[in-house]
Amino acid sequence: MKEFRDKVLRGGASTNPILALAQKGLSPAEFKTQIIEAFAPYFTNHDLLERFAIDVLPAEAVNLGKVRSSPVAQIAFDHARALYLSSERRHREAAYRCFAHAETYVAAGRSEFWSLCYLERPTNALGLHEFKHEIFRAIGTLVESCLQPILRDLLGQLRISRGRDVEYEALLPLPLGNIVGKLHDVTGSEIYAFGPWAVRLNQWRNMAQHYRTSVRGDRIIGWYGEPSHEKTIELSRDELMSVLRSCIAVFDGARLGRSLFGIDRIREIKPFLTGVEDRPEVNILSLVTAMATQGFEATNVEVSEERAEAWLRDHRSADRKARMVHASQFVHVLWTYTEAAEVLVHYCDANGCIAASFSSSGENCELFSEGTIDLATYVNRMSFKVFDQNIETGHEA
């Protein structure tokens, strides 16, 4: 997971606001209180909010901050949430089933989004032709692969709210243009044709994937629509970048609105879920953000089917032995996220030197999770090693 380490972990507090707050002294209890307060308006099942406040929601708290800072993302968030709630009021089971059946496709979109993030590179030095190519490539992938499955689910929820019993699978043959057109025409939401250009999302995708763009002087030209009614748009370099940012904002807002609805209704949705697999980065991001609320910075995480290994740098000045014990608890947590055959957690001091290592077999973790063995047996089967002389990890914070 080199890309994950380089893109996400290496930035430390500069890319993880939760870690930055932990470094400033915010305690785990204070984190939990603030997360619960932030998400309380969006939860009806407050027992789940309490349960997921540290394990699941810290990463979404970061996303909520991003959404609130972007007018387009906030509109998308409110719009998606309103559609799910309206659908639920009309036909609860149909709403939950459509959500669940969409999840496999939405998860695939999340995977593509991670690939986009990994392939992102600075564009300031690119010539206009190369800049156009890179930005439209990102727009095309974002709308087609990442956003379309969510929009299809939103259309299903819209139809359910209007009295139709819809199966997500029946929506799969619909072209993106039909999906966007129906959502825009019925709801009137500006997220489907944002900004001063009033170009619909599917047309941005079409310009990107059908290569209907060119450069003329210092302007970027795009063509869209049916040949008999073709339209032209001209953009500056900054304007095209603004289009990409708006597409990301729509994705961020709609994804978060959908995610919070799903977390809050997980008990009702879970019976309809089948075979959903996320790429490791999705779960590991939640894990390392949860670790940060406890004052631990994950400086590296390596995951395969055989082994999951994490290096945790301590940012607390509390009793060292107690902090080691605290770090050891992440062995089982790491297994729950990865289900690897072997799990290792290395506790590092503030200088990045290994002070202790903890490991367990995946089988031991699984038996404990199932309740087959008790805590004492689980701990006795773990391996512990405390170093008299600290060993530098070689992994950057």
Image (cartoon, rainbow, N blue to C red):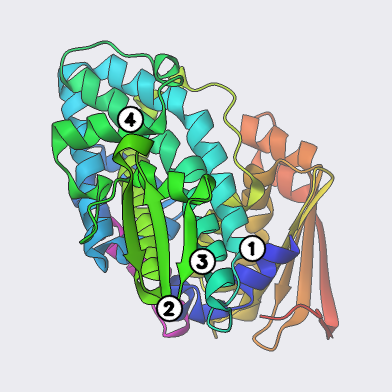
Q: Can residue 265 be seen in this view?
A: no
Q: What stretch is highlighted in magenta?
A: 22-38
Q: Is residue 66 left or right of residue 364?
A: left
- Identify the mark nearer the N-term, 4 or 1: 1
Q: Which residue is disc 4 drawn over?
A: 179
The CA span between labels 4 and 1 is 28 Å
Q: Position of residue 356 (x, y in %)?
A: 77, 72
- Residue sitting at x 38%, y 27%: 99
Q: Where is residue 54 in the image (x, y as percent from the top left)?
A: 43, 56
**Type of the residue with mark 4:** Ile
| Residue projecting furthest to the top | 165
Check whether the beta carbons of the residues at disc 3 and disc 2 lie within 8 A of each other: no
| Image vertical order of residue 358 relative to residue 303, above or below | below
Q: Examine the structure image and report whether residue 36 is included in the region drawn in magenta.
A: yes
The local secondary structure at tag 2 comes to: loop
**Type of the residue with mark 2:** Asp
Q: Which residue is disc 2 drawn over?
A: 218
Q: Which residue is disc 3 drawn over?
A: 132
Q: How many labels sit on residues? A: 4
Badge nearest the viewer, 4 or 1 = 4
Seen from the viewer's position, the closer of residues 300 and 224 is: 224
Q: Which residue is disc 1 drawn over?
A: 119
- Res 276 → quadrant: top right
